[in-house]
Image (cartoon, helix red, strand yellow):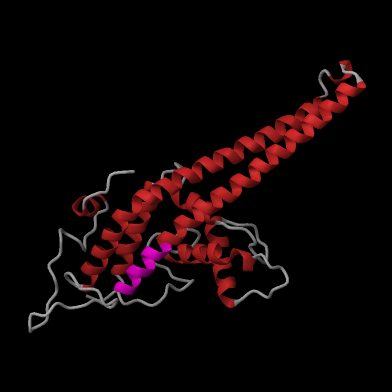
Amino acid sequence: MKPILPLAEVSRRYGLKHLQGLPPPARDEQNNMLRDPRGDFQFGSIKTNAIYRLASRWRHTEPALAMLADQMRSAWLMHIAGTEQEQRLKQEVRDGVGWDDLSEAERDQKWIDTLVGVEAAKDQQRASQVMAASFGGSIVMVLDSLISTYREALDLKEVPHDERVGDLIGGRSLGAILWAAANNHRHVDDWAKELAPPSKGMMKSIAVLKDAVKWPETPRITVNLGAYVVDKLMGSEGNFEAVNVRLFRYAQALADTVPD
């Protein structure tokens, strides 16, 4: 497991301006400890307490997120390998090199071996897609939970699908993207029901995801896009640290929308 970062290092690494060291407990005029909007004891101001709680939860969560991201990458590599194997086998059939020298029985057996190999490659692709979606979906669920708890500590309402806070991806905020991706992961079976009318919440989530990951313009999304979303958040270098940076930059931008 990755080492758990000290709180001070989290603050330094991600430039958390609302968190400079461990904040003191907030107290009222009678010296009673105050509670934040979630009912937890409040440390420092509302903003300081919210970012403190987020950083504390994140530092215990990040090792699991990093592990899930590694597994997601491995699944993508398995999918690529399966795709390449399928293409190679089909190309061998198209080229037909050496087939004329085989007897009829040998050609029949080679056909069978090729078909079995192609099906095995397709199985690998399908299984690795499920793996990547499962790992990616788990990541977006955890991140969305962190942000939802953080928003609650700031006494903010549920993230609107059209939020414009912090760095935008496809015109969508990180909070909106994770909210939509979590909905997709949670309800993908319902989304895949072609005959069921889409709900308003589903349509809002679909609109966000189409903008964020540039999904083809179709009326519905019937697959789990968790891995695609995480891949988009990691950027061109495919580094999960980019997701951590995005998380805290968004958190600080969100805090800046709250009056002091």
At which x and y percent is residue 61?
A: 34, 55
Q: Can you name the residue that lies furthest to the top here?
A: 101
Residue 15: within the magenta?
no
Asked whether, in this view, residue 21 is left or right of residue 233, the answer is: left
Q: Give the residue furthest to the bottom.
A: 30
In the rendered image, the residue lying farthest to the left is 30
Q: Nearer the viewer, residue 190 or 11?
A: 190
x and y percentages locating residue 3 in the rendered image: 28, 44
Q: Start and end of the magenta stretch?
A: 144-153
Query: Could one spot residue 141 in this view of the protein?
Result: yes
Left or right of 116? Residue 27 is left
Name the spot of residue 246 as percent of width and height, x first: 37, 55
In the image shown, does 226 or 18 lie closer to the viewer?
226
Residue at image point 58% right, 58% down: 224
Q: Residue at x 15, y 61 (%)?
A: 22
Q: Looking at the image, which residue is at 52% across and 59% down?
A: 212
* Residue appearing at x 58%, y 77% in the figure: 200
Q: Is residue 172 visible?
A: no
| Quadrant of the drawing holding the C terminus | bottom left
Rendered position, 245 above or below 160 = above
Majority secondary structure of magenta residues: helix
Question: Is 194 placed above or below 127 here?
Answer: below
Outermost residue to the right: 104
